[in-house]
Amino acid sequence: MTNRFFRMAFASFLCLADMGTTEAANDQSMSSAPRVEYYKVNGGTRPSDVSNLCLWYDFPSTTSGSNNPWMEYGLPIGNGQIGATLLGGVRQDEIILNEKTLYNGSPTDWGEHGTYASLGKILVDDISGMATVADDTRPINNYVRFLDIEQGVAGVSFSNADNTHFTRRYLVSAPHRVMAAHYEAEGKDRLHLRFSYDPDASIGASEVTYNAGRATFGGQLKCVCYSTEMRVVAADGTVTTSEQGIEVHGATDVTLFMTVATNFDDSTPSFVNGTRGQIAASNSKLLDTACADGWEKVHHDHVGQFSELMGRVQLQLGDAASTMTTKALVDYYANADNRTKADGLFLEQLYFQYGRYLMVSCNNVLINVPANLQGIWNNDSNTRFWHCDIHTDVNVQMNYWPAETTNLSSMHLPFLNNIITLAGDSYNFHTVAQRYKSGVRGWMVPTETNIFGGTSQWKWDKIKTLAAWNCSHLWQHYRYTLDRDFLKRALPAMLASAQFLKDISTKADNGTWFVADEYSPEHGPAGYSTAFAQQNTAEVVSSVIKGAEALGKESPVAEDELQEMRDFWNVLDRGLHTEEYNGKTCLKEWAELSLNSQNDASNHRHLSHLMALFPYGQVSGFANDANGKHLFNAAVNSLLVRNATDVTGWSGGWKVNLLARALMGNEAREIFALMLKHSQSYVIAMAGQGGCYYNLWDAHSPFQIDGNFGYTSGVAEMLLQSYDGNVHLLPAVPSAWTDGSIRGLKAVGDFTVDQEWKDCKFTRARIVNHQGMPLTVTVGLLPADASLSATVNGTEVGITDNGDGSFSIPTSAAGDIICLKAE
């Protein structure tokens, strides 16, 4: 404790001596203290040994002058269990650590539901004296730090005044389940480093034990206990250990391996299994393997696995490319004239892939816990940022919107398995349902929850259909994968949600049934019937019926239960009421209230009454009947009414998806300017500070990861839609994307789709039919005078023009490859 106190005090003294320039100075009272390097750093050029999809910078985050370098510049890496954020300091390399289940709450929480915790930091101090406060005539040169999102590897490189070149590489491996950092020196100087743990103050950590090149600590939170261990392996030089840490002297090649785990176990309602000693023993075995395999193999195995996932989808917009630093690129994009140039287009496609990168990094190791409001990254207790909880009225769902469409279906499973588990009668969501109304069947999800199903009480009894929204993810996973075994597991949870909603429904005067006394997330008034509640209810009831019918005799839904759902469906209010507003027909948000009566009808960040348009497909731009067209137009008009441009990051992401479903590609792309605008706030702002930080994290503000996923999902929806069972090619491509290609997107029915277009005209597509499903397509950007030709497995086939803009393609075998061409 004494060493830690003096280290913090000395850092505070130095900060007063040299605060540097300040970016985002509006966060004075609740920011992380900047760590200033106190010496001259000269930037380098874009590294040549990284992938095309790369974030990079020519200065350490610690010299940026930002009041919150973690939020503004921290580079995230993760394997779905372990998360780390890198700041890239030279004098001190600060690695901020997280573990997905390190949550200070419990399954019985009611009211105060705990908070996601930070494990703390690994501090790697340079003790060579090459960079000091006293002498800035010996600068650091050619400094570069980067995050290669194709390979899942981050790095730092620089040279000292003696022209010794130093490199660092960082990764969090799913195959080995460790975080690894590799340090090298090339030249006459050597590495002189001290490695130490700095546990977060909020987690009740034991004293750190250092012994024989390793360090450990652990502790107990309200529910889970945890343990962590790191080891330092040097290929040369000497390694010594003291109470201050692990020191390496005179080395050219050093590797740090670290792992951490808790005793979280969702197979039991207590959510724990095992002791801290057992966790520590398991950690040691993982590190034994990693140390024996060494950096080269750990790196090789990680890159192979990570890059396969990232490489499944490839987007190219015209000649998009850039060598700018990521900070410069964000600033460049702020000028509207630059957004159609190669660099501007590159940022749009980089941001799309960055969402996929974060998806993999949050879910790669299968732990049945969804990504929270900040994914798996957190640098303090974050109670002021909604606890980093599992927020269920759009946020956790948006975290998984791109999973199926962007070919990362297995990354959906942590959320899906968590839904199925918490739907069980022995878990807290069943208790919450009974708390609402004794004797009802099924389960209920409040808005604010933790990873164990513990909850707050905020509007808990006014937003009662959130379990149904969660269940839509179960159904969509089946629709994209056609995994019958998964559907057998999922249907009981879906049925139980539908049964709960039936049991609490009220009969209206017109004979339809609705969920009464609701609130439209997240604005009032409460106490009415909302489109949100009814559209959620309709979706889960319909999904239960379709799922049971798809499984037939294998269905776990009994025949009487299925008939009950059919009967309920026939009398259910679907939440698709319309009204005249400003001369246009719009979908209503409240059945009993007019939009004219709502002061914030046009500017609220939530779009809860448009669930029918997205994420559901209850209204469709491809409808051909009069009522379908009427409802679609009403939904689009309601979307245009909610025309605020001062949006939070996630709200912008939702709008991109909605505008894509409205087939309004140009308008969808206009939202990009709001989402890629640099935010200058690190505190809670409900408006005016959406956008992104210079590390491309989404800003609510503060950092909130759902907007990253919303953007990625929205771009996918602009390029491919299949929610109605047909494959709609290029449905909402903006005119600024004159030429391009997208490879590897997935469509309902387990199709993989590649597409190309040129001069704003469709040219060709390649579709793999993985399970022999019927195929009907529509083609956006198809010239009016063009014809469409098709081959199946290289043989030309006739196609059927259905007269409604769609074409049926003869394909019937699993593995068929269909090629379409405009002529």
Image (cartoon, grey):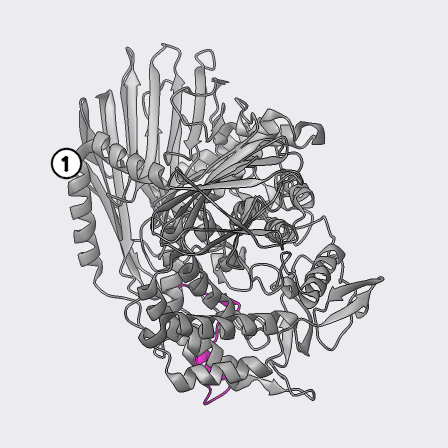
In front of the other: 711 or 650 = 711
In the rendered image, the quadrant that contains the C terminus is top right
Q: Position of residue 371 (x, y in %)?
A: 43, 54
User: From this viewpoint, which residue is outermost toward the right?
Assistant: 583
Residue 104 visible from this viewpoint:
no
Task: Report the predominant secondary structure element of the magenta stretch.
Answer: loop
Q: Quadrant of residue 485?
A: bottom left
In front of the other: 68 or 158 = 158
Disc 1 target residue: 292
Q: Quadrant of residue 102?
A: bottom left
Could you tell me the amino acid type at mark 1?
Ala
Residue 73 visible from this viewpoint:
yes
Q: Position of residue 43 (x, y in %)?
A: 49, 18
Q: Kindly state the secondary structure of the residue where label 1 is placed.
A: helix
Number of other residues with Cα within 10 Å of mark 1, as a class: few under 14, some 14 to 19, many 20 or more: few
The answer to whether residue 322 is left or right of residue 816 is right
Q: Position of residue 456 (x, y in %)?
A: 50, 70
Which residues fall within the magenta stretch?
Answer: 431-451
Residue at 54% x, 59% y is 724
